Amino acid sequence: MEDIDLFAMRERFNSQQIMLCFNGPISRSLIEEIGNALRNYLSADHAHPSAAMDVFAVYIEMTQNISHYARERQWSEQEAGATVVVSRNQDGRYVVSAGNLIEMTDGERLQQAVAGLAELDKVELKAAYKEQLRRPRDEVRPSGAGLGLIDIARKSSEPLQASLQPLASGRGFFSLRAVI
Amino acid sequence: MTDFSIPSSQSTPEIRSDWANGKLYMAGDSYPENSFDMFQQVFNWIESYLEQNQSELTLELRLLYLNTSSVKAMMDIFDLLEAAHQDAKPVQVSWYYDPQNERVAELAEEFKEDCTFPFDIVSQA
């Protein structure tokens, strides 16, 4: 096993303008604590209050979706992990990315959902959001991510990007990227 | 119906009810992973108040960020008020926000679109 080169990691984080990153099992309290740190960073970074709230909201929806998904499948704490990165891109925009293990069929469905949302403009996204909001709770798709995903798309300045990496275990690693 | 008072936490708002004066107060952020129990208590209180009173019910809101599960719960509350309003019961909402944060006003506006009862969105620095 390779030694951990913290300096190289730091250089990489700095060059990619990564403000915050996390990898590992995620609990309800950890989501809140990291969220709290994120808010402090955004405030220290003099983010506009609206942008700070959008970044925080996208972080919360992504991580709570991941947490819900693992709980519904009754996965172990180790399986219920998330990889979360908040960074800035070359235009200075905040980028929130999050990934998790997922069943391939769910991952494929989510990719289709993301592609579908990419076709919608802001007005259509709002209509889709309100429609989803009015749907009875028990009709919400079992893998969730309906309302949260539309909310993330509404708060993003460009279409969401999703990818699905098949793993040897038969599951996949799903990642979602939102540019605020 | 007994009044209740819930202090805020990092992810839940402060909530206070005042049966005698027909007032419900909610302030702060709301993004618990499971918001159902907390909002159920509010929902039940409002439902009882509207059943047992003809006097006005006012919601004073100083809510900030709501996650989507809290948004859904608030929509259920506003639907309850809308039904009461259709029954000619006096209900109203005042949602105060800091003009520094326009997202809060936008959130309140989206709720207001689906309500026909008095719904004031008040900028308060």
Image (cartoon, grey):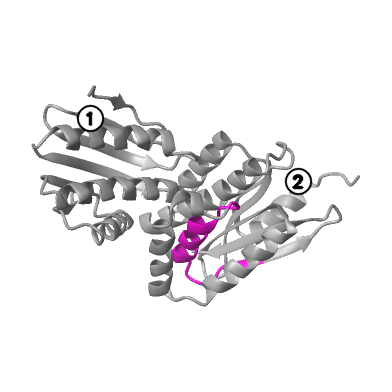
Q: Which region is colored magenta?
A: A142-162
Query: Which of the numbered marks, if any, corresponds to residue A6?
Result: 2
Q: Residue at x 37, y 45 (%)?
A: B73
Q: Is residue A156 magenta?
A: yes
Amino acid under disc 2: Leu
Q: Nearer the viewer, mark 2 or mark 1?
A: 1
Marks 2 and 1, how far apart at CA:
52 Å
Quadrant location of the N terminus of chain A in the rendered image: top right
User: Percent x, y for residue B117?
Assistant: 15, 54
Tag 1, which secondary structure? strand
From this viewpoint, which residue is outermost toward the left?
B55
> Is residue A165 visible to us here?
yes
> Is residue A47 visible to us here?
no
Residue A36 horizontal side relative to residue A171, left or right: left
Which residue is under mark 1? B17
Q: Dot 2 falls on which chain?
A: A
User: Percent x, y for residue B60?
Assistant: 20, 41
Q: Residue at x 56, y 36 (%)?
A: A28
